[in-house]
Image (spheres, rainbow, N blue to C red):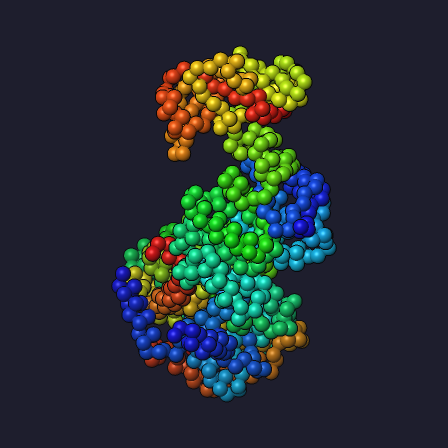
Amino acid sequence: MSNILSVKNLSVKKSNKEIINIEDFTITEGSITSIIGENGAGKTTFILTMAGLLKPSTGTIFFKNKMIKDMPLSEYRKNISIVFQENLLINDTVYNNIAMGLKFRKFHISSIEKKVDDILHRFKISHLKYQKANTLSGGEAKRVSIARALVIEPQILFLDEPFSSLDTLSKEDIITDMIKVLKENKITVVMSTHDKYEAFRLSDSIIVLEKGKIIQKGLKEEIIKHPANSFVASFVGVENIIEGIIIEKKSGSFIAQVKNKYIEGIGDFEVGNKVLLCIRPENIFISRYLSESDTSARNIFRGKIIEILDYGHFYRVTIDCGFNLISYITKTSLIKLSLKLNDIVFVGFKAMSVHTITMV
Amino acid sequence: MKKRFLMPITFLFFNFLFTSTSYCGNKVLILGTTTSVRDSGFLDKIIPIFEKKTGYFVKTIAVGTGQAIVLGKKGEVDVLLIHAPEEELKFVKEGYGLNRKTFMYNNFILLGPKSNPAKIKPDMNIIEAFKEIAKNRSLFISRGDNSGTHIKELSIWKKAGLNPLGEKWYQETGTGMGQTLLIANEKDGYTISDRGTYLALKKTLNNLKPLVENDASLRNYYSIIEVNPEKFRKVNKEGAKLFSDFINSREIKEIIKSYGQKEYGESLFYLIGQ
Amino acid sequence: MDIIIESFKSALKLLISFDKDTYDIIFLSLRISILSSLISSIIGIFLAFVISLKNFPAKKFILTFINTGMAMPPVIAGLLITILLWRNGILGSFNLLYTPSAIIIAQTLLATPIILGISVSAFQHFPDKFILQLLGLGANKFHLFLIMLKECKLSILSAIMAGFGAVISEVGASLMVGGNIKGYTRVLTTATVTESSKGNFDLAIAYGIILMFITFTINFILTKIQQSSTKRYE
């Protein structure tokens, strides 16, 4: 798989403030990459620059190994398309909105109607062909916006938090329809998002942006297992993020103090380091009776159940053991253990399931 | 349906926009005159006759007397038809004008409110009347715009040895004759007006009446002056001469004699020597 | 009160009897003001587009200049243009003074800052992101212009109506540069001045009524265009 887009030493400054600084970044053809990061991390700036809509202060962008600064940006943009969070439809029919890009890019007039009809069908909005754009629902308008971007057959599609304003159900449907078109036409996708389901559902790789720099990139499995910071940790669904100080170092493992309790984890950290200990809620088990010798888990605590929430498929149970721990358990387990609010229970997890991040 | 009409309507529309109202052509004469001359309607009567006769297009620029004279001094008009003898003499003396011919006159009248607080009597001459008004400090409305009427009014104050400028009872409107009459009518003031404008507005001026009329000092003389072509290359000297001769022709003399008879039962203008 | 009723009657009579003088004046006023509004709109809207998209150092200064130009007193504009057009003046060889063309020039000078100023504001309201979206779809500057024009239709048409309203109703400039020559440069507003100066108030008001009627009709047409297809609720 060849590299369709790569970025070297890219820097974008606005009024002497550096917004993004990307040393090295590559996208393979046909892949779907998600960019995640907090608000203000520079996701939009990064996407606009890669799309050729923002001129970088320094740095080079290569499109299929050709420097894009060797051609006028409008020339480069013929290969891309973009969708924003806002739908940005003109006050006209759905047909005219979708046909816009085809007309701009001078597609042959006889082919325009056919292409528009085809994309309308793929997004299941053929019945809206002549409807005015300002009468559409949010979901319908988003479909039009995406259809409009895809009908012009781009090689790379950029999306900047495209589904932020939609509810989960509408999102699901649209994403399904969109993926079909993307895969069929082998379109490379770069998408920024706040939603982990989108990121995991769609992307092959994820990059994390913080203060304009890439602080983590990799396949989604990697990110989930080893989030680079607390933001990524909570993004990927780590519910337990606990502050502590390393007080003892052993070979390959450590003991951290949290309030007046001790947690054992694995990894190389120095005594005195302030750390964040991340434990996925699925990895915390609850037990009525427990003794250390009965289990291989190094971390066992006694605490009181202070909240039980029904999450449909499972329960989310919060236990106060001096610090809060959140555990996901199945309905069956809850019933079997007859867990109720204010029950005193034991909670435990392996040292292996503690993912540790140094605090800065 | 609507789209079909778009083309012909657009065509008609642009056709309409670019049609000119009248042919300007090469024979153009620019006549500088005053608003009161225009308002009397006299020019509306004689200009078409001139245009038909000579094929000229006359652009009548009616402004205040002061401006008309300045336009003459700048060579922006070809011929002047005004009524300010002292200024006219200066104009000719300074070399700006040629062939000054005074061809008609009309009368100014002193008008006053029905209440007549200064007790002006019809047998008074105008100087006496002005003295009474000043003595009584009665409201006097002046045009104050350097027009022929205004200049005449000032010359009377001067002859009477008075200077009312700045006095509370002396108010300047800075506007035309019609407006000034209305203001005098409203505010119970005395004023000087040409007979023509007064007669035209008589119906509306139910509070004013003529008080002093036939004083020779109240005569308003109209002259025609050709602008000196030696001073300004662009002056149309043929046209100016044609117009000057035309004004002094017998045909026009007849018109002047009878002008106003039909509408007001009396002449508005008089020939020199009448 | 009577005079107003009388004036309405006169106005109606003049219109219905196709009085030549009156219709000459009406058509002249329309020709001149529509032409100058057209020229001002083309110049103003195009310049507004260019200014709103670019960021240059003197931008705020230029915008202030334009906004001040909107308030230019017509009679002063008229005076300045008269001095330029004097036949012994700088542009004298064009022989434009005391012609309808001079009035068109003066009115264009008055309307352009108005239309320009309001249009700049209209275009600046167009979201930056929308411009990026259109560029991302392949739009060039011309496409951008057409779309922004259509989306900002509401404000742009307000700009045009403001410009037209300013010139059809102004008298100072028309009087100075046109000379108020009967049948040639006498328009509705200058005719009103002449008739009131003569004391013919009913005729003056009649002209005024006709002027308002014309302005209303034209604005009605423009407003229909402005409000079409912008229904908020079905």
Residue name at image x 56 percent, y 82 percent: B25
The x, y position of residue B132, in whole percent, is 38, 55
Residue name at image x 45 percent, y 78 percent: B8
As drawn, A170 above or below C96: above
As drawn, A291 above or below C16: above
Quarter of the image containing the N terminus of chain B? Answer: bottom left
Residue name at image x 54 percent, y 80 percent: B24
Q: Quadrant of residue C50?
A: bottom right
The x, y position of residue A333, in whole percent, is 40, 26
Does residue B93 appear left or right of residue A293 in this picture?
right
Does residue C7 appear left or right of residue A185 in this picture?
left
Examine the rendering and report whether any part of residue B242 can be seen: yes
Examine the rendering and report whether any part of residue B86 can be seen: no
Residue name at image x 40 percent, y 60 percent: A127
The x, y position of residue A216, in whole percent, is 63, 35
A144 or A221, nearer to the observer: A221
Q: In this figure, what is the number of numbered marks?
A: 0
B153 or A90, nearer to the observer: A90
As drawn, C33 above or below A175: below
As drawn, B248 above or below A277: below
Quarter of the image containing the C terminus of chain B? Answer: bottom left
